Image (cartoon, rainbow, N blue to C red):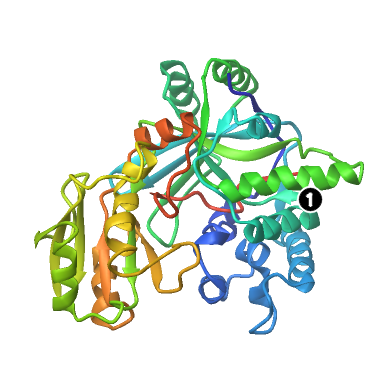
Amino acid sequence: MAVIRPFRALRPVREQAANVSSVPYDVVNTEEARQLAANNPLSFLHVTRSEIDLPAGTDPYSAQVYEKARQNFAALRTRAPLLLEDEPSLYFYRLRMGAHEQTGIAACFSLDEYERDSIKKHERTRRDKEDDRTRHMVELRAQTGIVFLTYKATDEIDRLALAVTADAPLYDFRADDGVHHTVWKAGGQESSALVDAFRRVPALYIADGHHRAASASRARAELRQRGDVGEADTFIAVAFPSNQAQILPYNRTVKDLAGMTPERLLDELRGHVKVRDGKATPGAKGDVSMYLAGRWYSLDLSSATPTDGSRANALDVALLQQHVLEPVLKVGDIRTDKRIDFVGGARGTGALERAVDSGQAAVAFSMHPVTLDDLMVISDEGGIMPPKSTWFEPKLRDGLLVHVI
């Protein structure tokens, strides 16, 4: 059983939706955010990455950053303007990128279910990242980042989605990155039917946004201590059916070859995995493409033995770590090792080639994507996927639907 709740969305007027909306706060660094928001005072990045409006070099976790976020949020509510709905509602949010399209239900979801693990997780969170968004939520009294959930598709919810999305949308625009965003508001009757239909959904899974959900839970706890929970018992998310959500590979680059030449690296690798000439994109699970010294190779991990029998440790990203990165390239904990970087699949294999050819990296690995079935099975087992396993694309925009708490 899954509980969804209509909510009073804070949202921009239709004419300013494209200008207000922004990429998620955690897919850009400070300088990238500053460039994206340049010459656009309505960009929601002024709220989610408010350090861009402070002197260069400002600590992004300093008190003045959160105060600036609060000030920018208040100003944007007037300037855009952002309007608070009179009545709680549910919404449908469609993302279209090229030929791919996915439509999810935007709602508030139960933090009680999250804390009981009825909303299932597959990723460990970092305390420092939780600290940041928890403080951001408490300062603004708003959840500005949307969690991406998934669930096993049902005909009942699909039919309701078709009915609501047949009407005129609230928003319909193409963002600068080429992704098309369309949002509809469900009527009272459809909202009631959706709430009822989700009661028959056996489980929800966090696809992307573990830190947002964890921070919402911590923000509620802090507000409880103050005796002022308000609307903080839920968190905002969009739930997409699993047959529509798209996972792209999460690729890797390594800055150096641990003192080896390319020729020596190839010799070392042949003692661990099968190596042959290959293409930039791996053709199947168990195949990893490696770009080294201007050439693509294929590393066959299909017969590699995982460290245990869990599904998580049989993923290609885990096998690559166990049989290549750690023993050969001496990359230990990928959460903390500064020699390894990660490249979302939306940037393509050309980004890997450019990193190596420019000298920013010495070697790159192009992965086969993890499946939604992998994610769900591992989550059902209470397992944890290796860090940087999944890259969900296209991504939801910040600023279109905000949950005021």
Picture residue at 63% right of the left edge, 75% below the top: 52
Q: From the top left corner, tell me how far across and down residue 28 is, in percent.
A: 51, 66
Label 1 neighbourhood size at 10 Å, few (<14), some (14-19), many (20+)? Answer: some
Q: Quadrant of the C terminus?
A: top right
Q: Is residue 261 left or right of residue 387?
A: left
Secondary-structure class at tag 1: loop
Q: From the top left corner, tell me how far across and down residue 72 is, in percent.
A: 74, 66
Picture residue at 25% right of the left edge, 50% below the top: 368
Image: 188 above or below 257: above
Residue with the mark numbered 1: 141
What residue type is disc 1 on?
A: Arg
Q: Residue furthest left?
A: 277
Q: Is residue 262 left or right of residue 93?
A: left
Q: Is residue 210 visible?
A: yes
Give the tally of numbered discs. 1
Image: 322 above or below 45: above
Residue closest to the eye, 103 or 59: 59
Image: 355 above or below 328: below
Q: Is residue 185 visible?
A: no
Image: 158 above or below 47: above
Picture residue at 64% right of the left edge, 84% below the top: 56
Residue closest to the eye, 303 or 60: 303
Q: Residue furthest right?
A: 227
Q: From the top left corner, tell me how far across and down residue 131 is, in percent.
A: 70, 58
Q: Residue 234: name its quadrant.
A: top right
Q: Quadrant of the N terminus?
A: top right
Picture residue at 35% right of the left edge, 31% below the top: 243
Q: From the top left corner, tell me how far across and down residue 144 is, in percent.
A: 66, 51
Residue closest to the eye, 8 or 12: 8
